[in-house]
Image (tube, grey):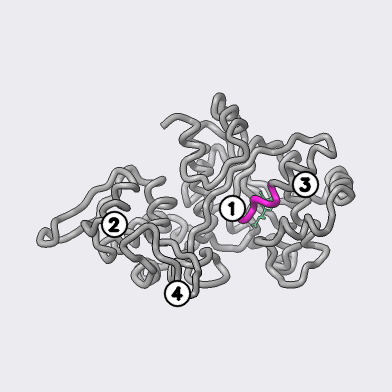
Amino acid sequence: MDAYELITRNAAEVVTESEIEALADDPEGKRAYVGYEPSGVLHIGHMLTANKLIDLQEAGFEVTVLLADVHAYLNDKGSFEEIRHTAERMRDQFIAYGLDESNTQFVLGSDFQLDDDYTLDLHALELETTLARAERAMAEISSGDSVKVSQAVYPLMQALDIPYLGVDLAVGGMEQRKVHMLARDVLPSIDREPPTSLHTPLIADLGTGRGKMSSSEGVTISMEDSREDIESKVNDAYCPPTADPEPTDDGVERENPVLQVFEYHVFPRFDSVTVERPEEYGGDLVYDAYDDLEGDLESGELHPADAKDALAEYLDRLIAPGRQQLAE
Ligand code: IYR
């Protein structure tokens, strides 16, 4: 796989393609980052962008993980002290998950976001941005119903993080895209480059295939799950024999989350996937590529129950090192 393919595989969107091509021409020493509001324990949403960081490291990038303590505080996630403590716990879990330690820089937001220069630049961006625009950028991130001033400041700080961290590429889930678009628009007003960004897809809720999997609602997978937890969640997952399920009767779109987890979590991290089956049911199936597994589920060659057993096995392998680390 060439650098461009590795950088963009499984991305829902890149902004812009030609900017990514320029980075892919000479990726050595380029820097990419993801910011996370510290939440204590890594869950499957963190793991999705972490997979992309691992791809980028393989392509030659250096990686910064921003433990966004000030952002979590602004988004009403607890007292600053608590959040700081939680942030410390996340470093080791990212490394246990598979980020290359020798090439990952962890930065706390509060290490630079409270400095004078940053604060003055932030005020300059506040002058350039309407409340309505800031509010729109936060629609898929904000945790409360009523919009507080803190939530208008949040996306402007996220935009400013990009030049302050000196990164060439901002990575995030699709829910971050409006913040990155705002950053492209407002950073030039303070003589900073519009940033290049890459967004990972959102995975549907494991139980229903609807909406997006999140740590706050529905079924999710986290580093705290035991093997039995994973088996029972995956066993109960929505998995029709198609990658393109019909919407619900009331018109809500659905995805196949079991296939999505294979595509975005398992195949990027394993060279091949074995679905174990007794001889009388046709014996083991070995897949080198996601599309072959999807094709077999659709044709009926692979039964959803066997796909789920294999998914639980591979998710367990991905999570085991983080679970171990949490137990220490
Ligand atoms: N908005 C992110 C957290 C975050 C991301 C970046 I990239 C930053 O520079 C700062 C914060 C979230 O929703 O978790």
Q: Give the range drawn in magenta.
A: 173-180
**What is the three-letter code of the residue carrying label 2?**
Glu
**Closer to us: mark 1 or mark 3?**
1
**Contact, mark 1 vs mark 3 (Cβ under 8 Å):** no
Tell me the SS state at disc 1.
helix
Question: Is residue 197 rendered to the left or right of residue 236?
Answer: right
- The mark that comes first in sequence, 4 or 3, is 3
Q: Which residue is drawn at 73% across and 42% down?
A: 184
Q: Which residue is drawn at 21% across and 57% down?
A: 301
Give the Cα distance between marks 4 and 2: 22 Å
Determine which of the numbered discs, if any, sits on residue 249 in the image.
4
Name the image quarter holding residue 46.
bottom right
**What is the three-letter code of the residue carrying label 3?**
Phe
Circle 3 Cα neighbour tier, 10 Å, few/some/many (<14 / 14–19 / ≥20) = some
Give the Cα distance between marks 1 and 3: 26 Å
- The mark that comes first in sequence, 1 or 3, is 3
**Residue 248: x and y, percent?**
45, 71
